[in-house]
Amino acid sequence: MDGDILFEANSAQLTPAAGSQLDGLVNILKQHPAATADIEGNVSSDLIDDPQDQHLSTMRAQAVATYLISRGIARNRIKANGNGADHPAAPNDTEAHKRLNRRCDITITGR
């Protein structure tokens, strides 16, 4: 995939750009029926250990998983977890950096 799946602040709704990226992932998974997808939801945060961060990151990962399942990928090929704010892609010091942290990282394993 060309980038991360981004979300708006405080939202687990996929952006239109995320849908087009995920369609490419669906095609890859269909071409490789033994491959699995590990989805990790992330959030930006100004707070440390905010329980809402964990919930939102899990909801983001579930939104991606639901999209893949709705396009015909078997549920048992998908693992979705939330990281809270524990794995930032950038510091949470600017709005641009916070936007980078509102994402899901997806790792494909197997063939």
Image (cartoon, grey):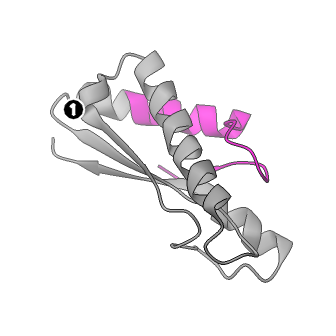
Q: Secondary structure at mark 1?
A: loop
User: Can the viewer see residue 3 in this picture?
Assistant: no
Graded by Cα atoms within 10 Å as few (under 14), some (14 to 19) or many (20 or more), the crowding at tag 1 reads few
Q: Decide whether residue 55 is among the magenta residues.
A: no
Relative horizontal placement of residue 104, taking residue 17 as reference (left or right): left
How many numbered markers are drawn?
1
Taking 10 as reference, is 42 above or below it? below
Residue located at (59% from left, 50% from top): 55
Q: Which residues are magenta?
A: 1-26
Asked if residue 68 lies left or right of residue 17, the reply is left
**From what the image shows, is residue 43 above or below residue 36?**
below
Q: Position of residue 100 (x, y in %)?
A: 68, 65
The image position of residue 54, as x and y in percent, is 56, 57
- Percent position of residue 16, x then y: 72, 33
Q: Nearer the viewer, residue 57 or 28?
A: 57
Residue 93 image point, x, y percent: 78, 83
Q: Which residue is mark 1?
A: 32
Vertical comparison of 68 with 18: above or below: above
Q: Please state, as top left, top right, bottom left or bottom right, where the C terminus lies in the image.
A: top left
Q: Amino acid at mark 1?
A: His
Viewer can see residue 32: yes
In the picture, measured across the screen, residue 108 lies left or right of residue 32, that is right
- Residue at the image position 45 percent from the left and 33 percent from the top: 65
In the picture provided, is 60 more to the left or to the right than 82? right
In the image, residue 25 sits, relative to residue 101, either above or below, namely: above
Task: Specify the quadrant of the image occupied by residue 32.
Answer: top left
Residue 13 falls inside the magenta stretch: yes
User: Residue at the spot x=44%, y=18% of the render?
Assistant: 71
Residue ID at (49%, 62%):
83
